[in-house]
Image (cartoon, rainbow, N blue to C red):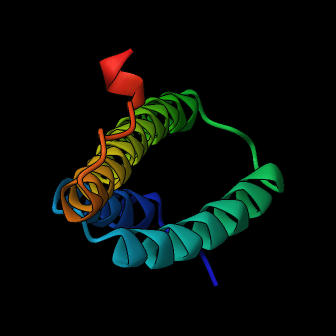
Amino acid sequence: MTTNLADILEITDQVQAAIDSGEWLRARDLDVERRSLLEQFVVEQSQTDARPELRSRLAVLEQRNNHMIGEVHHHRRRVLRDASMVRTGYAAAGSYDSAALYGEEPAKTLRDT
């Protein structure tokens, strides 16, 4: 079976679209398929003469791959930051609720210091 670089690029587009729409599981599944095709493609091409245009297209694919990795890391940092804010909010709300219930001074949070 001959692996087509156009198919790999098409799946790369699909991975990017899944990342852009926040469909993380779909992006992961597509990337597994994409990696498999890419590995197969490299093995097939290593058995033939490497053409300069192929190297150029692979360089473009590498650049797109690095861009997607950067986007995923950006989204991950945003989600972790949001989760941290939610945890802090719950802790503060619990502290104030407890203080109101028992008539105590609310505990200081990291934000208060």
- Residue in view at x 33 percent, y 23 percent: 111
Is residue 3 visible in this depiction of the protein?
no
Q: Position of residue 33 (x, y in %)?
A: 54, 76
Residue placed furthest toward the bottom:
1
User: Is residue 34 rendered to the left or right of residue 108?
Assistant: right
- Residue in view at x 42 percent, y 26 percent: 110
Above or below for 62 versus 110: below
Is residue 18 visible in this depiction of the protein?
yes
Residue placed furthest toward the front:
103
Figure quadrant of the C terminus: top left
Residue 28 or 96: which is nearer the viewer? 96
Residue 20 or 97: which is nearer the viewer? 97
Above or below for 76 versus 42: above
Residue placed furthest toward the right:
47
Above or below for 46 versus 1: above
- Residue in view at x 36 percent, y 35 percent: 74
Q: Quadrant of residue 64?
A: top left
User: Is residue 16 rendered to the left or right of residue 38?
Assistant: left
Q: Quadrant of residue 7?
A: bottom left
- Residue in view at x 38 percent, y 30 percent: 108
Q: Quadrant of residue 38?
A: bottom right
Residue 6 or 68: which is nearer the viewer? 68
Figure quadrant of the N terminus: bottom right
User: Is residue 39 rendered to the left or right of residue 57?
Assistant: right
Residue placed furthest toward the top:
113
Q: Position of residue 107 (x, y in %)?
A: 39, 38
Q: Position of residue 85 (x, y in %)?
A: 30, 43
Q: Position of residue 3 (x, y in %)?
A: 56, 71
